[in-house]
Amino acid sequence: MKVSTVTGPGTTELLDVDRPQPGPADVLVRMRACGICGSDAFYITIGGISPRQGCTPLGHEPAGEVVQVGAAVTGVSVGDHVVINPMAAPSGIIGNGGAAGALADFLLIENAVRGVSLEVIPDHIPWEVAALNEPMAVARHGANQCSPKPGDKVVVFGAGPVGLGAALAFKSLGASHVAVVDILPGRLDKALQIGADAVINSAEEDVVQRLIDLHGEGEAMFPGKPGTDIYLDAAGVPAVVTTALSAAKRRATLGIVAVHKEQVPVDLVNIMSNEITIVGSMGYPDEIFEVTEDLVANWEKYALIVSHTVPFDEVERALQLASTPGAADKVVVTFP
């Protein structure tokens, strides 16, 4: 079979490797779709990640069809459609420095346990939507970290895949109003299509005033603060943190799910005096299959997040497309 592999700085190749053979506790999955993440572009740039520098298999957003089931595995059958937890692989995180990557014809699920390493999904869910399970778990964890309460008013900065997924998560968790901020009209249109209550173009509008218009005024040491309960940074731009903290009312929460590539100064007196909570979010300790139920129930909304599908035999083009700023929102590689 073939697997997309980082073989050096800025270089990937489709390598021929032996098809894995499952043991009694394993499941073999024929890949049907795998999303491309921003971290894939980073791994390519640096030539792979330890301990597989120079030979790092790619792909950690997998969905596929079970083709072999070990004798000791229960709850999984040949032909099942599954989503996979890349973090659970005993030989290392799938597509993140582990022995296997999901941008491959087949993927071996070692010590396969339903609800831990993989989960079965209905056959009617499109493969490219199923491949969103992993990044949507990242978005769900970001929302969960903010501890939303029913009725909370929320603003999400950044209408990329994780930001849109977080907007869906907040709605699922009972938020009464979710606004999404971005500078690209196409992304804002998509946010409305998936169910955001309002959108704000920060290149053209005063974000704080629009939030006051949408969420009313909130209690704070100084007047003029929106009644927004939760601010989520899914953009990774310093101005987002500055705007959110300057706008935050008393006891508001700022969640950080985006990767920041430079330090961001903060006003600690403001944080202290308004008792603002800042919480980080990384990965999905518990959400990898928590999000699956919502993904299945609302798959048509999640489908809007996918901007491009590219066949596996053109995976190099898919990786290039995903790494080109502004060229695509979410690229998913599909398999025959």
Image (cartoon, rainbow, N blue to C red):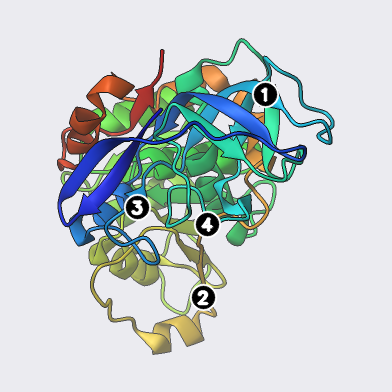
Q: Which mark is residue 276?
A: 2
Give the number of the mark in front: 4 or 2. 4
The reply to whether discs 1 and 3 touch (Cβ–Cβ < 8 Å) is no
Disc 4/disc 3 C-alpha distance (Å): 20 Å
Q: Report which residue position mark 3 lands on.
A: 56
Residue 25 as seen in the image, left or right of residue 264 = right
Mark with earlier residue (4, 2): 2
Q: Secondary structure at mark 4?
A: loop
Look at label 3 and name its amino acid.
Thr
Image quarter (top left, top right, bottom left or bottom right) of the N terminus: top left
Q: Report which residue position mark 1 lands on.
A: 68
Look at label 2 and name its amino acid.
Ile
Residue displayed at 63% across by 58% down: 285
Look at label 1 and name its amino acid.
Gln
> How dense is the environment of label 1, judged by Cα within 10 Å: few (below 14), some, or many (20 and up)?
some
Q: Report which residue position mark 4 lands on.
A: 283
Residue 25 as seen in the image, left or right of residue 41 = right
Give the camera-side residue of 43 and 92: 92
Residue displayed at 26% across by 29% down: 315
Give the number of the mark in front: 2 or 3. 3
Residue 331: quadrant of the picture: top left
Give the camera-side residue of 57 and 300: 57
Mark with earlier residue (2, 3): 3
Disc 4/disc 2 C-alpha distance (Å): 23 Å
Is residue 240 positioned above or below 222 on the image?
above
Residue displayed at 34% across by 62% down: 49
Is residue 254 positioned above or below 292 on the image?
below
Residue 281 in the image: x percent, y percent? 51, 63
Image quarter (top left, top right, bottom left or bottom right) of the C terminus: top left
Look at label 4 and name its amino acid.
Gly
Q: Secondary structure at mark 2?
A: loop
Mark with earlier residue (1, 3): 3
